[in-house]
Image (cartoon, grey):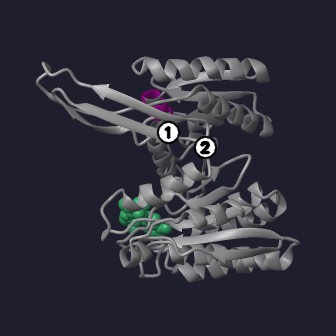
Amino acid sequence: MKHLALIPGDGIGKDVTDAGMQVLDAVSEISSFNYDAELFDIGSERYLASGTLLEAGEIEALRSKDAIYFGAIGDPRVRPGVLEQGVLLRLRSALDQYINFRPVTSIHPYVPLKRETDFDIHFLRENTEDFYMGMGGRVSSGGDLELSASRRMYDLKISLHLDADVEEDFAVELGLLSRKGVERFAEYSFRHAESLGQDRVTLVDKANVCTGIYGFQREIFKQKAKEHDMELDFMFVDAMAMAMITRPERYGTVAVPNLFGDILTDLGAQLQGGLGLGASGNINPEGVSMFEPIHGSAPDIAGKGIANPIAAVMAVKMMLDNLGCPEEAEMVRKAVSGCLAEGKVTPDLGGKLNTWQVADDIAARILKG
Ligand code: ATP
């Protein structure tokens, strides 16, 4: 019996996770997969009513689960950043989910790039460091700025002082990588490629400009490549953005630091057919991982029943893989492919079905076997 946590969150998060759970129920009906799910009421409604985002007790309860299934967070009534930082980033960091795994594959017939060869890129985005440390602020003439960050591997404090004779205001955002942080990122990337029978990892960076952090990262990846007897390619992020359009089929496992990963994986989502299709996993290989659609709460379509549930259903597929149930994961993948091939889709993909009809269709295919 697997113990799951369910966090529907905001906007369309509830609709699409309901759809995902319906699909999971279908899987458990015809396989040996068994689960229970505890519902966590985390998101904007609670924040607006009580001012609370995420309690320490909730983090501990989530830590004890086998996996977390997450919908979306975000609400136009709440100042941007409050929910994202207070819930999503806090969860990823408290649960040390240091890898964000986003597969980008040719999804027929919705893939906008018509190529002779299909692509199947596995983006592994580092999820805890780089420019997403939250270490930013402002400092002016004669002033001091204290920046701090806390990670499982370290607590960090940095003080900046600006001399009084410098007559200018400055804004600072620190991008930072630790040796331990890069080592575990590199180790996971090479193991991931090995598990797929691949012989190389591509590391994306901007080491020709941000030489400090990305030069350091290259050294550690080179060392890990030697240890794993694997090849390592380097791509600058701008070149990678172009290559994703011109020759995506050349790439397999792609390791990318946090900020560039955020951008490239959204490009990847469009490359495979749109936001309604892509899923991601926030992975802690030694702890609890969290699976979610890559889209947000989509306030513009919330409550209309037209949210595409496929990204959330594919997050269920990733969760099943992560829980060691590849056959059950394959049932979901096959059912989704069937539904896409027959155009049983929501309006964002040009279809006429609503969220529930797509979920019913996928569940029915699974039950048919
Ligand atoms: P947030 O701040 O929560 O990320 P957002 O609106 O900025 O919200 P998304 O929620 O990712 O960003 O939505 C971006 C656009 O894509 C919106 O127009 C939305 O309607 C559309 N969209 C996102 N997810 C879906 C989906 N599952 N089905 C249909 N359309 C979607």
Seen at 62% across and 48% down, the residue is: 97
Q: Vertical placement of 110 versus 136: above or below?
A: below
Which mark is in front, 2 or 1?
A: 2
Is the residue indicated by label 2 positioned so its CB lies within 8 Å of ligand 1?
no
Residue 145 can be seen in this image: yes
Magenta segment, prevailing SS (helix, strand or loop): helix
In the rendered image, which residue does mark 2 sit on? 98
Q: Which quadrant is home to the N terminus?
A: bottom right
| Ligand 1 - quadrant of the structure image | bottom left
Confirm whether the magenta stretch covers residue 31.
no
In the rendered image, which residue does mark 1 sit on? 258
Q: Nearer the viewer, residue 139 or 224?
A: 139
The picture places residue 47, in percent across and down from the top left corner, at 40, 72
- What amino acid type is highlighted by mark number 1? Asn
Q: What is the span of residues highlighted in magenta in the rendered image?
A: 238-243
Q: Nearer the viewer, residue 102 or 257?
A: 257
Q: Vertical placement of 122 versus 186: above or below?
A: below
Q: Count residues near mark 1 (Cα–Cα under 10 Å), then give few for <14, some for 14-19, many for 20+.
A: many
The picture places residue 87, in percent across and down from the top left corner, at 48, 60
Q: Vertical placement of 167 versus 251: above or below?
A: above
